[in-house]
Image: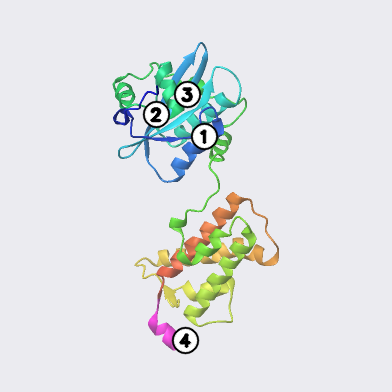
Amino acid sequence: MRRSIDISKIAGIEYHGSSRVTQDSIDAIVHIINSGEKIESAWLLSWFDGRIGEHSFLLNIFPTRQVLIKPGFTSGYSGEGPTGLSTALQILQLLSIEIEEYEIDQALKQRTEAGCLLSSDLEKLEKSRPIRPTRYYDYILSRPNSQQKTEVRGIQRCFPAAINFGLLDERLVELAISLFENPDSAISTAFRRLEDIVRDRIGIYDKSGSHLFKKAFEGDKSLLHWNDLDGGEQAGKAGLFVAVFLAYRNPRAHREILSDPREAVREFMLINQLYLLEATAEARIADLASNE
């Protein structure tokens, strides 16, 4: 006869990642970070069979959410599992997330694999003392002759190139959707559209690129401005338009630029900032009237 499950005893937490599939567990941590969640602390749950360890993470997320990353990590030998554990720890360290390690028994380890922790498991962990002296540093694999800057870049590459649609000017959403399919087309179109937007606003159609933006934004008699009290702020914002077009748009106007996804996102977000600035610029009414 099947044993019934008492639902009231099950912990109300989320489960991400896959048991024994290291990359899935790393991706789960990355996705939570990229979603904007604030991870306050990470508990490394470790179970050992002799010298071989199996590990999972319990992430404590502000304000009261908990997520278990299933045990796709191992230690005590060379291979994907220990390398993945090292990577996961370095990702958490990169974001200055507090890490504590707790040793668990086999029964609790099996419940982490099955994704059915009990409320009593969480209570027991909260009352437990973390392992001292801290030893999770021992799981981080050192790379001979590797500089810290290189190691940080390696960890950053665990995060996929992605557009945060919540930060985009609404006029760029359509182009952002196609960015990874054809980055040169999306970015070049974004530049051309911005020129057309500014031309229509100031009513001047015989200028382009840096000449157009100097006419629109530069100096006390610019046709558009941001009502900045400090003239240096106006000059700095105007200079952004000129600099970005000279550095990025002009090369694209003469040849196709092949960008990797990360470079494409960085350039696209630069253009996005120009769109956001243009949207907040106001017309100098007197100058526009005399221009007409």
Mark closer to the observer (1, 2): 2
Q: Earlier in the sequence, mark 2 or mark 3?
A: 3
State how the image is colored: rainbow
Element carrying mark 3: strand
Assess whether mark 3 and mark 2 are in contact (beta carbons under 8 angstroms): no
Residue 69's place in the image compared with 229, above or below, is: above
Q: Which residue is mark 3?
A: 55
Using the numbered discs, state the Cα–Cα distance from disc 2 to disc 4 in whole angstroms. Answer: 71 Å
Query: In percent of the image, x 43 and y 26: which residue is there?
Result: 112
Question: Circle 1 sits in a helix, a strand or a loop, which is it?
Answer: helix
Instruction: Specify few, some or many for label 4: CA neighbours under 10 Å numbering under 14, 14-19, or 20 or more.
Output: few
Query: Which residue does the numbered mark 4 point to in the structure image?
Result: 291
Q: Earlier in the sequence, mark 2 or mark 4?
A: 2
Report the residue at 36% width, 67% height from top.
228
Residue density around tag 1, few if under 14, some if 14–19, many if 20 or more, within 10 Å: many
Magenta stretch, residue numbers: 283-292
| Residue 219 left/right relative to 141 | left
Whether the magenta-drawn stretch holds residue 275 is answered as no
Q: Is residue 253 visible?
A: yes
Quarter-wise, where is residue 220 in the image?
Answer: bottom left
How far apart are labels 2 and 3 at the CA level? 16 Å
Per the model, the C-alpha gap separating discs 1 and 2 is: 20 Å
Residue 26 badge: 1
Residue 116 is marked as: 2
Tell which tag, 4 or 3, sits nearer the viewer: 3
Residue drawn at x 53%, y 31% as measured from the top left: 87
Q: Earlier in the sequence, mark 4 or mark 3?
A: 3
